[in-house]
Amino acid sequence: MAAIKPETLVYLVDDDFSVRDSLSLLIETTGQPVKCFDSANAFLDNYDPEQAGCLILDVRMPSMTGLELQEEMARRDISIPTIFISGHADVPDSSKAFRGGAVDYMEKPFDSDILLKRMNEAIQKDLETRVHKIKTNKLKKRVKQLTPREHEVLILIVKGFSSKEIGKQLNISNRTIDVHRAKLMDKMEATDLAELTVMAMHCGLI
């Protein structure tokens, strides 16, 4: 199995030392760095939001369970692909985990190869999400550079209105619309209407 990029990290949270020890050794055989924690609170105290990776999380733990940690992460706006592991087949728990956004729920003992496969998929998902977020944030910064009028024109352009129709709605000349269009295309760094429309969609403008 190919090694994961060194900039990614697997967080492993389980109150059972033997589980942490065996799983961390398994994960490290792939070349993937892993950090282990014996409690949900220890994980929260050490989680780095800038670090791409995934979370392998035990369901039943004292003090704060895995499902309670999932809820706490949602409250703190912590978004990391999570694989739940459990020693008990519990349909309500698994259903709750998936509703909370878990990528998988595996019952102990589980197949090591399947766990590693799910881990790789979760890490890839996190990397893709982060790339998308970076791209979206860049686009939103460009949108903020627009004047209020350019922003109005942008919305109407990507909705399919012509310069003549936009001019009538905003009560300004077609020539002025063309000037705004040229400026906003430059600020958004868009080469054509199709690209501008995709940008607007990424920013949630349409």
Image (cartoon, grey):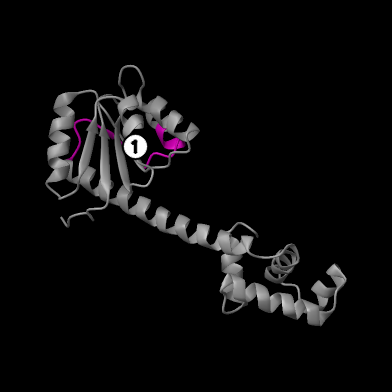
For the C terminus, give its image quadrant: bottom right
**From what the image shows, is residue 36 above or below residue 147?**
above
Q: Which span of residues is magenta-colored?
A: 97-111
Q: Position of residue 32 (x, y in %)?
A: 19, 48
Q: Nearer the viewer, residue 66 or 51?
A: 51
Magenta segment: does it hold 110?
Answer: yes
Q: Quadrant of residue 24?
A: top left
Q: Position of residue 18 (x, y in %)?
A: 14, 26
**From what the image shows, is residue 105 above or below residue 195?**
above
Q: Secondary structure at mark 1?
A: loop
**From what the image shows, is residue 195 above or below residue 131?**
below
Q: In this figure, what is the number of numbered marks?
A: 1
Write the residue at 57% across / 75% down: 190
Q: Nearer the viewer, residue 116 or 177?
A: 177
Q: What's the amino acid at mark 1? A: Tyr
**From what the image shows, is residue 94 above or below residue 137?**
above
Q: Quadrant of residue 110?
A: top left
Crowdedness near tag 1: few (<14), some (14–19) or many (≥20) residues, C-alpha within 10 Å: few
Q: Is residue 181 left or right of residue 11?
A: right
Q: Is residue 23 left or right of residue 97?
A: left
Write the residue at 17% across / 55% down: 3
Q: Nearer the viewer, residue 99 or 146?
A: 146
Q: Position of residue 118 (x, y in %)?
A: 27, 46
Q: Position of residue 116 (x, y in %)?
A: 21, 46
Q: Nearer the viewer, residue 187 or 170?
A: 187
Magenta segment: does it hold 144?
Answer: no
State the residue position of label 1.
Answer: 47
Residue most extreme to the bottom: 175
Q: Is residue 64 left or right of residue 171?
A: left
